[in-house]
Image: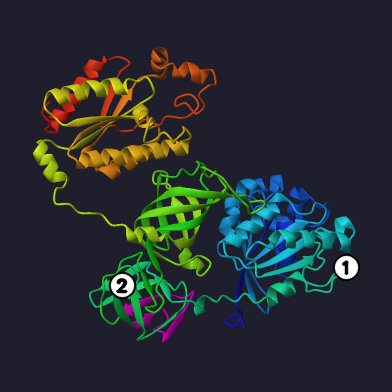
Amino acid sequence: MSAQRDLLRFITCGSVDDGKSTLIGRLLHECGLIFDDTLAALSRDSRRHGTTGDDIDFALLLDGLEAERQQGITIDVAYRYFATPRRSFIVADTPGHEQYTRNMATGASTASLAIILVDASKGLLPQSRRHSLICSLLGIRHLVLAVNKMDLIAFDANRYTAIVEAYRDFAAKLDFTEITAIPLSARMGDNVTSASADMPWYQGPSLLQHLEEVDVVSDQAGKPFRFPVQWVNRPDASFRGFAGTIASGRIAASQDVRLAGSGRHSKIQRIVTADGDLAEAIAGQAVTLTLGYEIDIARGDMLVAPEAPPEIADQFAADILWMGSNPMLPGRDYLLRIGQDWTQARVTSLRHGIDVNTGDHVAARTLQMNDLGLCHLATLKPMAFDNYNENRATGAFILVDRFTHETVAAGMIRHALRRASNIHHADFTIDRAARAERNGQLPLLLWFTGLSGSGKSTIANLVEQALFAAGRHCYSLDGDNLRHGLCRDLGFTDADRVENIRRAGEVAKLMMDAGLIVLASFISPFRADREMLRELIGAEDFLEILVDAPIETCMARDPKGLYAKAKAGLIPNFTGLGSPYEPPETPDIRLGTGASTAEDCAAQVLAALRQKGISC
């Protein structure tokens, strides 16, 4: 019987204290799935931590963390596995607090059905709408509106009807295919597994009956074949297979397949499992595939159906749920993972934010933790993917901070941006090497970074004078000068600072292609952006020069009067006061301008250039 039961993954969500954990605990109890010793321990814990008097507090069965029990809230996602004679279930009990929205999204990412709980005595709350919107964005199409705590409103049918109508009005613009409303009392067990005698006016199914009967059997097997390669299995010279889990579709021996990236074709020779070879495998099965004739395949590649290939693009639009503690900054580089494939990626623009309470589009320059928005992204290499609404397995991705390795965002791809396929690099006969040879010098970027007033521009000016006198071809890029023209549309928010440095780096790269030595003087407060420049230019042609002066020294100098204005509140987000400065950890050159003269610092830079073979 167990082998014949299908599996339903569902999630409980909603506002804090709407009874999510209590509902799942009661459901398990009513199904006789709590062992006697666990029930005894739960009874003891209820007297210590519970909120239900002498009754068992079933929420404690799910709230396993001590902090959860002390506060009476769910913090992390709790998974429970159970089965009835008709179906197997995996339920994710997710937190209701707004600050844990990212935890809730984690639970929703693999669910096929969502139970949105609403406290009947409170009605719809912002978090009820927030979680509904996230469930819709994450591809959940079946929803149960569980109007809980009906006992607190004396099982009032009119109040229940008003809540259901209000919710349906809100959810009309979301992508749910089915909304089933059920009135219940999780604490008392009303309509959880059997009909409630206190609500004879409700003639619909109990919650368990609906969960057993709802038709959400995954249609992944009917979708085009997708097989992300997780591991190249080569135990010896006689065997080479590709291991992974079939994301969608089905595959059979002798069937043609295509490698998504290169477009090369082959034929399935064997479908290998630990229990022997299979004639056919479907979505969800972990297998090793061998090919009739070998093609170059590595971890992260994807085998697909030749007649229905995925999108291949290096730019796409996606809905993003931001999970990072630091804000999302367009222009900053992150690591992106789709399946097993990793690449470097950049959020090129934030098209709009999404009001999580209404679903409306709102103007935004950045995303904070738990914010939603539609973004355009560019990747370092073309990626294979599907529209998320068509295939959740191959249309989802995560963004990872390149330095902390924190997962900072979850994304759902909408569509490719075709612009990338129409733009190509133009090759010219006269290239950077030819121009450098004509100039008789090594193109180089000297990047001066430091606080305002540290002496960046002064030192760069002295270095440029010496290079010019020695016959070197050079140019100075100054942050203030660029803000009069190329960057005049940018302010001083974190997002604008990132874009300012990105533009300056692209200009510097063009000048280096012309064979010039470029001296750039920018505060450039963020370490990640300077590392982005190093990768853009190339480590061997990039010198990061920290112009290091204590902020007290810079404030005493204050050549432009900026510190005085910032302290007076006239300049918000001023680096060193209202906005942080992240100094380089290992700069190529460190200039201590607090104790040395500008001339001595310039001489130190010139000495480093001579060591690189630049006469000056």
Q: In which quarter of the image is the C terminus?
A: top left
- Residue in view at x 32 percent, y 71 percent: 233
Q: What element carries label 1?
A: loop
State which quarter of the image contains the N terminus.
bottom right
Which residue corresponds to the image point at 34% horizontal and 61% vertical from the top-left? Answer: 421
Q: Residue 199: give its label.
A: 1
Residue in front for this viewpoint, 333 or 282: 333
Q: Is residue 453 above or below residue 66?
A: above
Q: Residue 406, percent across and down?
A: 46, 47
Contact check, label 1 and label 2, Cβ < 8 Å: no
Q: In this view, does 341 lie to the left or right of 60?
A: left
Say which amino acid is labelled 2: Gly
Compared with 529, 232 (above or below) is: below
User: Is residue 286 rendered magenta in the image?
Assistant: yes
Q: Where is residue 54 in the image (x, y as percent from the top left)?
A: 84, 54
Observer able to see residue 78: no
Task: Determine whether, in the image, residue 136 is placed left or right of residue 192.
Answer: left
Seen at 46% across and 39% down, the residue is: 495
Q: How many marks?
A: 2
Q: Spot the residue most to the front.
A: 485
Q: Provide the secondary structure element on which disc 2 rests.
A: loop
Disc 1 from disc 2: Cα separation: 61 Å
Q: Can residue 442 be seen in this view?
A: yes
Residue 263's tag is 2
Q: In which quarter of the image is residue 440?
A: top left
The spot of residue 73 in percent (x, y) is 69, 49
Q: How crowded is mark 1: few (under 14 residues within 10 Å), some or many (20 or more)?
A: some
Region in magenta = 269-290
The residue type indicated by label 1 comes to Met
